[in-house]
Amino acid sequence: MTNRIGHITKINGNMVTVEITTFVVQNEVAYILHGEERLKCEVIRVRGNLAETQVYENTGGLKIGEEVEFSGELLSVDLGPGLLGQIFDGLQNPLPELAKKCGFFLKRGVYLKALPEEAEWEFTPTRKSGDKVRAGDKLGLVQEKIFKHYIMAPFDLQGVFEITGIAGGGKYNLKQSVAQLKDQNAKQREVFLKQTWPVKIPISAYAEKLMPEEPLVTKMRLIDSLFPVARGGTYCIPGPFGAGKTVLQQLTSRHAEVDIVVIAACGERAGEVVETLKTFPEIIDPKTGRPLSDRTVIICNTSSMPVSARESSVYTAVTIAEYYRQMGLNVLLLADSTSRWAQAMREMSGRLEEIPGEEAFPAYLESRIASFYERAGVVRLHDGTFGSVTIGGTVSPAGGNFEESVTQATLKVVGAFHGLSRERSDARRYPSIDPLISWSKYKSFVEERHVKKGHDILKKSHDVMQMMKVIGEEGTSLKDFIDYLKGEFFDFVYLQQNAFDEVDEATAAERQKYIFSFIYRILEAEFDFPDKEKARHFFQQLRQEFRGWNSSPWGTPEFKKIEQDISSLLEENTKKDKVNA
Ligand code: ADP
Ligand code: MG
């Protein structure tokens, strides 16, 4: 690219306006040349001979007139073997290495290679010279941790290409070409183990996108049974500060039945993110017995980094998720919290002096949120295999008010809503997803009439409880009181899950179905209690038994013994002609 230099004419926080004499495009990356420093920024608006850029660094000390070099490239990420297990910032700098280089206080203007370029990978070709390929087609593979990491034809290829050369099996680094392609016009392309992709453009080198239908088992009973998430679907977790959003996402990242988890941590506080980073590598993956970090990529921004960098972290994360989907893997992207991302948009929009929408968020807030979640999906690849990206985002509205813009905009586009309530978290009813406000458009693997009964009893129980607050227990009929106890019982033994109990913290689909149908019989049963005291006592006993049952491993003698005990307890207390109704 020829010398494309502009000059700073205005500095407003992280927005720097540059006078240009050459053609620049939206989302083009530029560097502010400040002494020895090169500060990365991105063009967010072009008006006449002025390019407005958001700087991904602290802009302290910059001066009017300083030079800005335009790169001719869109903000992009590196995609290739070596991503798994890494912790990046929003610009894909590997954070541990950055810290090594800069010490504790991250220096600005230091950018590192996202992937180790010299590292060698054992490449095995899966296609041969003369084969015809399209964008995204698999050409060969390397082994990355426990996955076959496919090396694919560049995602930007137009039309059909012929392989004119492909490397034999052997070791290659990221800078060595492993295949050569040519199109009908003899246009040549080299293929490397690594390719780059602009973060704001979805990777779509697949045959078609399908409706998400298959459940994504998170092993959280409340989610899977009542408010399920589908593979390739979307969901959101709004909740007030401290209600358990982050813990819920961590549990999901550990137990959800997916291949790869990408975490975009846009921290509320630096401490929270540091906590994630410290604990994560130590967590053993229940599925593989290896560190969980082996199948995880973390993109991390804390509130102490410039807000503009938060914006890019969400896009970097989703692009990496799409990359692994192209290999035929199931990927879960967890963004925590999308409110911080929205704040970055608000801040920049303010600087651009755009006409503000509600709560000073830009008018395009909704469409930005929608196009982020739209990048989720199940796709059929050209070779007939399938891959998926599921997106779950937390929202942290001030004061837990779900009427605010980010929550509302998100609710319009996602397939499931897991609303956390302060009431539940204060009562330590974890996960604190409120079953009375949450919903899902996806289908649960639990029988429909069972699910309906569950919802009905929770609603009824809540109504009775509200009524009792007014008229007291004495004024409540025994029948209503039993419904109240049934709802509480269901909540305690099924919806709530003990994250500190090895067995209870994750419940497989098969077990959920079994336990739910067992509970269904209890919720349907008519009981023979002489008074409320007896009823209360019975449900207390039942709860106790279930607690033990929930902690006993599936199918063990202990599990069966408790099941028998519960069955006898039920037998003794149900109206005889109604058992197993
Ligand atoms: P948020 O992200 O919504 O601000 P956190 O996820 O950080 O909230 O949770 C705040 C605190 O609540 C945690 O530090 C923990 O003590 C408690 N907590 C949240 N979820 C659970 C859970 N499932 N089991 C036990 N404690 C929990
Ligand atoms: Mg949190």
Image (cartoon, rainbow, N blue to C red):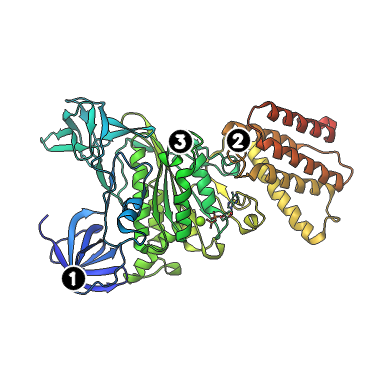
The mark that comes first in sequence, 3 or 2, is 3
Q: Quadrant of residue 205?
A: top left
Q: Earlier in the sequence, mark 2 or mark 1?
A: 1
Q: CA distance from mark 2 to mark 1?
A: 63 Å
Foreground pick, 341 / 559? 559
Camera-near label (3 vs 2) is 3
Q: Indicate the position of residue 554 as horizontal and vertical percent values.
A: 63, 30
Residue 290: assigned label: 3
Q: Which mark is residue 446?
A: 2
- Can residue 362 be seen at all in this image of the molecule? no
Label 3 amino acid? Arg
- Name the mark on residue 346: none
Q: Earlier in the sequence, mark 1 or mark 3?
A: 1
Q: Which residue is mark 1?
A: 66
In this rendering, the answer to whether 367 lies above or below 507 is: below
Residue 131, placed above or below residue 535:
above
Query: Which image quadrant: the C terminus?
Result: top right
In three-dimensional space, the C-alpha distance between marks 1 and 3, rounded to whole angstroms, equals 50 Å
SS class, disc 1: loop
Residue lying furthest right in this view? 530
Residue in the picture at 59% in, 41% down: 505
